[in-house]
Image: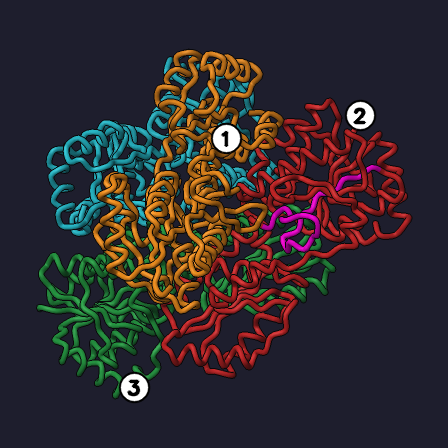
Chain colours: A orange, B cyan, C red, D green
């Protein structure tokens, strides 16, 4: 193998640059050329590639986002898109590909693998919903971004009699909502995986209020309902002023935490090593502080179990 | 004068604790007793006061919010509410009052002044819409909170072809929106004071896109329209993916900046000195780095002019 | 068991408050009383205890330091000190004790255990030098504090031709220095565990300089030498301007990260559960995301192995 | 005038990129070409210039440091150096120059002015020691960096009986030390402008300790003594454990605050406008929120008066 490629796909997250940087430095150390495809699978289908060297990744380690840019590319799902990508990879002399992204991106990686092209996937998704890795890239930074904002809101919450509804990311996953709720001492976490009864929540809020605890933080995963509607329902039910914050893409950005810089660095290094060793069709992952590799087939079929220990803790801590 | 009171009213902001701390330390140094009324005018009407000393304000300087808590108190607008407050002030032996808050709170202060009770107001409003002060308390911290979040979003914005609509506070005031837009290099600032044509904005976004500049940050004051509707209109008009962030009360909290700690410290000190000198019915303010005092009558009648220099700069910098 | 105690000892770290809060809430949920001893073993020997309830721990989760305060207490090493502590525990009706701290504190815990008093230890040490736990409390926050400062210095480093020597904590441990060096892309990490040749480092700096790379970040564990002397040696050897930063106790403080809030919450909960189940003489720890318990005897005899994967990565990433 | 130049010189600070960006955008809007000289006067003497356009300054607004890099250039003080610079400016067709820097850099600007070359200076110095401007560029960010670190240290300070000596920048200026001391509620600020008696400070520390206030923060300007020696003296005198932090270049970096982004944007815009209007030999400055221009002759002769209001406040607040 003389030359490999790398791309970032789907929703970006903090730590992607650290991952690319490590992959590039590992490749160069192994005398491999490495090319970066811009804007994910879109760049692959267009053959939009740039050669990467130490200088390309200098000064990127502590930047959020991905300097290779990302995109969602529905056309890649079609066989023609995949063939176009394969043709470009071959004409550029690229013999293996590192793909950094979430669910959809790993599906794309599997498609290439099934066509016989050597691919290694790297799990990146702030929802932490990818199986066979304890943590996906970007989760730790997103969580720390969230608590920074919620800590600020708690200052003002404790100054007023009010309920605050804070919407965090997670269309199908309550991970960010429930973990940040524990970490911030929020009163409620509303998640798509578990039904909740708004009337009951209002009743609990009223009971708290009568005990003199006159403010509350409710963390809401976006998939569990609209923040504004929930806030209005609470206000109507109990006459409490409610305020809404929607953290949106703030959660994805910012300088990556130490954890995400290290995780990305380890993932990037191992992915390149695996390609060089002739491995393919696998996703790297973190298990018990070790970097493991799992066939993409299994990853795509699998699903992540909720963390029981976390759920029990939520009960004790009052959520 | 032997004893004064202090309260925080209306929306809280960062720097209120620094203000109270400075007022307390100034009062003690002048051998004045000082009592804090809890939850603004509500506490005044209930006589809910706590004596304050050095220990009460220890460890508060760097905390957001207000440890005296705040509230909106419509009942205080009625003459009966004001008489109740006066009776409490007298029975507690309080001979002068420092009131920290925005528009509505300063109106309340004027009402007490007209009843002959010595009051000094301190302007606190993240909207920076109070006349006779260059800056109100809390503005600088709110602005820095906003740019912290927008900088994070810019990381992810530059990774994708997308428009981001970020809603900041300001029901009647575009100050936070326009200043943070300049400070962040946002593409558009939508404010309640100036009409805007969404169709034209969409056209400009499309033109930018065709030039290859495929992401944009739009900062929206809450009084200028709903973030979600504007985002949807943009998406419908130009097929661009749009993402919404509503910063909400995140803007009010967090550790105050140096500017707000100093401003609050100076305001608190001067307010107590003015009361001790027999002044009343005034609001302290910042003008040319000096602390001035303006009759509350004028403050309440006046209105803040927009900053022309800022507007011209916005043009040059591309907003 | 009806009543337990808790204390924080040795150097404080971020996450101690989260740990105490979780222990308190767990105890109350199990109908156990819980008392906090102030200033570590000193408070134990004086019987300086405060009853803890939900209100005592409200608003503490996101604060650095420890509201129970900490201290080093050489007198506790003597048998008389330990007997005094035992007597106080008994007279207060305390039947089990949670001790949060590092090396020395866990030795103290073992001493109480050997006297037959039920004790559970919680590892807290930013050096991450305690065996039988993947991570000690406070490490993640300290690392993130460090990189925040180093990222700032990198801004200015890339503006100038200069070498920066940044001293981090670690008298006997290079953990913080080496991990933060990887996470920040520093050029050198100097640690007490591995000898280094300053002359060779200067030679490498000169070689880098000749290639046009005219700035460098050197992260130094305090146990590996004085920052000032090393900076002066570099300056003398190669005529490079060198600048020194000593991060000091900045590293210990600040709002804890999500990781430390969760780790502290899990440690605190498990420690109380273990005492309630009649366990004693153990330290809780994190292993493969699970909370385990190891006899204090083994902890005190053991030592933490350096992380080989990390060392290999340091090589690749250029340190 | 068809073409101007810009450079950053001396110690860098946050906000320099915002200044360059604004100068570039203003120049382009006025149909002026603009070239950036790299590494300050060194680049001027070498003719090391790069043409600047919108793209050059894209993504720089929120970065610390200066992408044009900076340097100290003793050779520029000699007439030959200045002649070399002039020759380069002429051969490159540059007809006016914007110089961003502190004391020494403005002296260099005056030298060029005296040789008849149109120059406008922009005051940038975290020491805030440049006359004819209320605030120099970078001061606000440096102050906020300092308090972020000191707030962290206060967490740990309140957990222990200890004194903390924190060294901030300021060889001849106590501005950063005294303002940050007020903003953080430090117990002492030691500055080069005012003599202090270490024995007396120790006595006050002992007295405080006897009253039960067992921790203290001492902020020291680097020009007022070595942090380590002062810490050791305190320890020897009163047996108190003392800890040292030297913030160093951490203070210069990091994302600029809103204030520095706006100040830099206003300075950069005005400097270019002045050159275009045929003004020369002046420095822009901030006075009463307006941008003014003062002859460099006066700036270089003048000196900044200490802020009396600040000093009085320091007394009240307990420093």
User: Mark 2 or mark 3, which is nearer to you?
Assistant: 2
Asked which secondary structure carries label 3, the reply is: loop
Q: Chain of mark 2?
A: C
Answer whether labels 3 and 1 touch (C-beta < 8 Å): no
Q: Residue furthest bottom?
A: D80
As displayed, is residue A207 above or below residue D182? above
Q: Which residue is denoted by mark 1 in the rendering? A: A178
Quarter where residue D15 is shown: bottom left
Is residue C205 shown left or right of residue D163?
left
- CA gap, disc 3 and disc 1: 66 Å
Nearer to us in this view, B59 or D69:
D69
Any magenta on residue C131? yes
Span colored in magenta: C118-139
Asked which secondary structure carries label 2, the reply is: loop
Q: Which residue is denoted by mark 2 in the rendering? A: C2
Q: Position of residue C148 (x, y in %)?
A: 47, 54
Nearer to us in this view, D289 or A125:
A125
Residues marked 2 and 3, same chain: no
Which dot marks residue A221?
A: none
Asked which secondary structure carries label 1, the reply is: helix
- CA gap, disc 2 and disc 3: 82 Å
Q: Position of residue B17 (x, y in %)?
A: 49, 37
Residues marked 1 and 2, same chain: no
Q: Crowding at label 2, few (<14), some or many (≥20) Cα neighbours within 10 Å?
A: some
- CA gap, disc 1 and disc 2: 32 Å
Q: Chain of mark 3?
A: D
Q: Residue at x 43, y 58 (%)?
A: A278
Q: Residue at x 87, y 33 (%)?
A: C90
Which dot marks residue D78?
A: 3
Q: Crowding at label 1, few (<14), some or many (≥20) Cα neighbours within 10 Å?
A: many
Is residue B209 shown left or right of residue C317?
left
Residues marked 3 and 1, same chain: no
């Amino acid at each position: 193998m003389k030359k490999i490629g790398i791309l970032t796909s789907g929703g970006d997250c903090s730590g992607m640059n650290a991952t690319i940087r490590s992959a590039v430095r590992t490749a160069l150390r192994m005398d491999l050329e490495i090319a970066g495809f811009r804007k994910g699978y879109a760049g692959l289908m267009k053959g939009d590639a740039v050669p990467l060297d130490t200088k390309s990744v200098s000064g990127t380690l502590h930047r959020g986002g991905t300097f290779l840019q990302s995109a969602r590319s529905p056309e890649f799902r079609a066989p023609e898109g995949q063939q176009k990508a394969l043709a470009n990879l071959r004409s550029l002399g690229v013999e293996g590909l590192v793909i950094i992204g979430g669910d959809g991106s790993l599906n794309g990686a599997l498609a290439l693998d099934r066509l016989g092209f050597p691919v290694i996937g790297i799990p990146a998704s702030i929802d932490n919903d990818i199986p066979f890795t304890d943590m996906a890239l970007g989760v730790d930074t997103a969580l720390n971004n969230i608590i920074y904002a919620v800590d600020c809101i708690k200052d003002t919450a404790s100054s007023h009699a009010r309920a605050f509804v804070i919407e965090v990311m997670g269309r199908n996953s309550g991970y960010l909502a429930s973990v940040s709720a524990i970490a911030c001492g929020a009163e409620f976490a509303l998640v798509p995986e578990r039904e909740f009864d708004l009337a009951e929540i209002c009743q609990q809020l009223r009971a708290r209020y009568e005990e003199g605890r006159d403010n509350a933080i409710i963390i809401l995963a976006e998939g569990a309902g609209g923040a504004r509607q929930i806030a209005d329902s609470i206000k109507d039910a109990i006459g409490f002023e409610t305020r809404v914050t929607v953290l949106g893409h703030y959660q994805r950005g910012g300088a990556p935490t130490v954890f995400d810089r290290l995780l990305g660095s380890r993932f990037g290094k191992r992915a390149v090593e695996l390609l060089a060793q002739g491995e393919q069709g696998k996703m790297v992952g973190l298990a018990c502080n070790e970097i493991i590799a799992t066939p993409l087939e299994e990853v795509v079929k699998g699903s992540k179990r909720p963390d029981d220990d976390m759920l029990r803790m939520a009960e004790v801590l009052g959520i």
